[in-house]
Each structure stands twice: as C-alpha cells, then as structure tokens.
Image: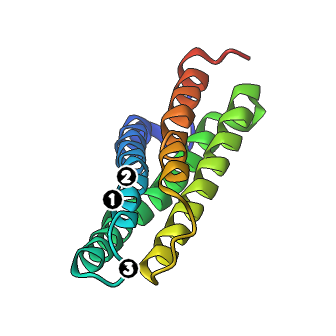
Amino acid sequence: MIGWLGEAYPWVKAAHLIVVIFWIAGLFMLPRFLIYQTQTAAGSAEDLAWVARIARLRRIILNPSMILVWLLGLSLAFDIGAFDQPWFHAKLLLVLLLSGYHGWAVGTAKKIARGHRPASETALRWMNEIPGIATILIVILVVVKPF
C-alpha cells in the first residue's frame, strides 16, 4: 500500500535521516562548546568567540535541522499510519524529550553568553550524554520495533 507520499516516500525518509544526523551532531557539539566556553572568563575575547560559534551552530545547524526532523518525521508517520504502533509512541516521546533537551541547551547557551554560568562543567559533561542515549533508544525502536 502506497501512502499519500507515494513514490516520494524513500526520498522523504532519506531526507529525514540526513537531518536527524545533522541535529544529533549539533546536539553533541553544543554541550561540548558550552564546556569549553565555561572554562573562559566571561566577557573575554575567547568567551565572545565561543558566543559567536554557538550562535552560528544554533542558527545554521541546530534549529533548522530540528524543524526539518519534525516536519519530515511527522510526514512519514502519517504516511505509514505509525500513530497506531506502540513503538512509535515510545519514539515520539523520546523525540519530544530530545526537543526539550534542545531547548534546555539553547537556553543554557544564551545564559552563558550573557555571562551567567548556570551549570557546572561536570553537569554539562553529564548532559552531553543525553543525545547519545536518546539516539541509541530511538534507533532500536525504529529498527527492531520491540513492541
């Protein structure tokens, strides 16, 4: 059975996977950048360079790729009727949580850019693990479909 995407389905799926890779790469980079930035003196030239790098990461990679992940992913889900599948509910929950993490990381970056250091280096190192764990769980849900 061909859904409403028709012959475009494999292309939409490929595009979805590509932007997922970009989004996750950005989510790996941002906390690492924040760790490096918190090691600098607020307002220093090095700190301002990190502010500019992080702003570009958000503007060029993180935000556009998250939007495209959602648009393409929901298109695929509606096309195959995934909302009836229990594995998809779990995946959707994880993607929602990952989007919340994205918001937290961007908010933390903005606070650090203003000179406030809301999280310790250790906390940022722990938070840096979240995208990897989420990716592992999401891939297992999509490929294995354990329930």
**Which one is earlier in the sequence, the residue at label 2 or at label 3?**
2
Q: Mark 1 and mark 2: span between their CA atoms? A: 6 Å
Residue 110 position (above or below residue 146): below
On-image quarter of the N terminus: top right
Q: Where residue 20 sits in the image (x, y, percent)?
A: 42, 44
Q: Position of residue 111 (x, y in %)?
A: 52, 77
Q: Quadrant of residue 53?
A: bottom left
Amino acid type of the residue tagged 3 in the rendering: Ala
Residue 115 drawn above or below residue 57? below
- Callout 3 crowding tier (Cα within 10 Å): few <14, some 14–19, many ≥20: some
Q: Secondary structure at mark 2?
A: helix
Colouring scheme applied when the structure was drawn = rainbow
Q: In which quarter of the view is residue 79 placed? A: top right
Quadrant of the frame with the C terminus: top right
Up the image or down, 140 lies above or below 103; here it is above
* Above or below, comparing residue 11 to residue 74 in the picture: above
58 sits to left or right of 132: left
Between 136 and 85, the one lying in front of the other is 136
Which sits in the foreground, 97 or 39? Answer: 39
Residue plotted at (44% across, 38% down) = 9
Residue 64 lies, in percent from the top left, at 40, 64
Is residue 2 among what the camera can see?
Answer: no
Marks 3 and 1 close (CB-CB < 8 Å): no
What residue type is disc 2 on?
Answer: Arg
Does the rendering let one see residue 39?
A: yes
Judging by the rendered image, the residue that carries numbered circle 2 is: 32
Mark 1: which amino acid?
A: Tyr
4 and 56: which is toward the camera: 56
* Most foreground residue, 30 or 42: 42
Q: Which residue is mark 3?
A: 42
Residue 36 numbered mark, or none:
1
Q: Nearer the viewer, mark 2 or mark 3?
A: 3
